[in-house]
């Protein structure tokens, strides 16, 4: 069965610094998608970045980038130039595309950006 | 504002009761997704509808059901409620037919079962 593990329950980073959130997953499938979602104190879920497993190039969205290591089943999120508005819970998610429609979330990492 | 509207924002009810949560997707989105976020279970995908048809099913209990209407709004029905059903229920919408597309989330409905 697929699992998603976020081993860092809480992290903090100074404003303008860089922080990396880790995510590992376990699957026997070769085609899937990985997502990072942000949930600020307002509780609304916001998609941060998406990675397609068949693409070797790491996805990037402005200050957010991922380090996708398919063989190691690792999908970490790097936030550069951290801003106070980045303070939130971050969830890693795995979605299979094999027709079984597995959609698994990690337990989340609470990130606090310090002024 | 994501463009996805969920009502009500808060709902308080008693065990054994039945409630209906409503979701209006973004204009043009044909897919609606339902999620549950609770302290015990974390975030879970429940079910997806695409243009009125059930498309994907996740960890949805048999006591729960959903449907999508011709105007594309969706309702999640929760019956025989238990204390453990207390959670934040999110709806999301997408133009995608599956799960892999970019989804836009509503603000959620917080359900408290007393």
Image (cartoon, coloured by chain):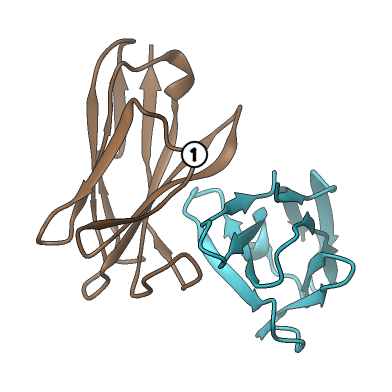
Residue B14, position as x, y percentages in the image = 31, 11
Q: Chain coloured brown: which letter?
A: B
Judge whether residue A91 can be spotted in this image.
Answer: yes
Chain given the colour cyan:
A
Residue B68, x across and y down, in percent? 20, 53
Vertical relation: B60 (above or below) B95: above
Instruction: Name which residue lies at 75% across and 84% down.
Output: A58
- Please, which residue is most extreme toward the left here? B70
Give the class, few, some or many, for how many residues have Cα within 10 Å of label 1's Cα (few <14, many ≥20).
few
Instruction: Give the percent coordinates (x, y) of residue B49.
Output: 30, 57
Q: Quadrant of residue B9?
A: top left
Measured as percent of width and height from the top left, residue A9 is found at 79, 43
In this picture, residue A49 sits left or right of residue B65:
right
* Residue beneath the point at 70% across and 51% down: A2
Q: Is residue A55 above or below residue A36?
A: below
Q: Is residue B107 visible?
A: no
Q: Is residue B73 left or right of residue A72?
A: left
Q: Quadrant of the C terminus of chain B?
A: top left
Q: State the residue at coordinates (63%, 50%).
A: A105
Q: Nearer the viewer, residue A92 or B107?
A: A92
Above or below, B100 against B23 in this view is below
- Quickly name the residue at label 1: B59
Total tally of numbered discs in the picture? 1
Q: Tag 1, which chain?
A: B
Q: What is the quadrant of residue B2 in the picture? A: bottom left
Judge by depth and name the residue closer to the eye, A3 or A47: A3
Image quadrant in which the N terminus of chain B is located:
bottom left
> Could you tell whether B89 is left or right of A51 in the image?
left
């Amino acid at each position: 069965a697929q699992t998603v593990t976020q081993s860092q329950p809480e992290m903090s980073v100074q404003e303008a610094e860089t922080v990396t959130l880790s995510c590992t997953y376990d699957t026997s499938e070769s085609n899937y998608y990985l997502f990072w979602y942000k949930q600020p104190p307002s509780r609304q879920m916001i998609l941060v970045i998406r990675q397609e497993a068949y693409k070797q190039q790491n996805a990037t969205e402005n200050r957010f980038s991922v380090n996708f290591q398919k063989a190691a089943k690792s999908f970490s999120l790097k936030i550069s130039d951290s801003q106070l508005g980045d303070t939130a819970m971050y969830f890693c998610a795995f979605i299979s595309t094999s027709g079984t429609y597995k959609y698994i979330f990690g337990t989340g990492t609470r990130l606090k950006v310090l002024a | 504002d994501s463009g996805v509207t969920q009502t009500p924002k808060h709902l308080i009810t008693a065990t054994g009761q039945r409630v209906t949560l409503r979701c209006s997707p973004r204009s043009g989105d044909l897919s609606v997704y339902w999620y549950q976020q609770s302290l015990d279970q974390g975030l879970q995908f429940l079910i997806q509808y695409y243009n009125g048809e059930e498309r994907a099913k996740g960890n949805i209990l048999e006591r729960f059901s959903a449907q999508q209407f011709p105007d594309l709004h969706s309702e999640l029905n929760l019956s025989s409620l238990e204390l453990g059903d207390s959670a934040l229920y999110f709806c999301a919408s997408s133009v995608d037919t599956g799960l892999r597309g970019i989804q836009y989330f509503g603000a959620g409905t917080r359900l408290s079962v007393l």
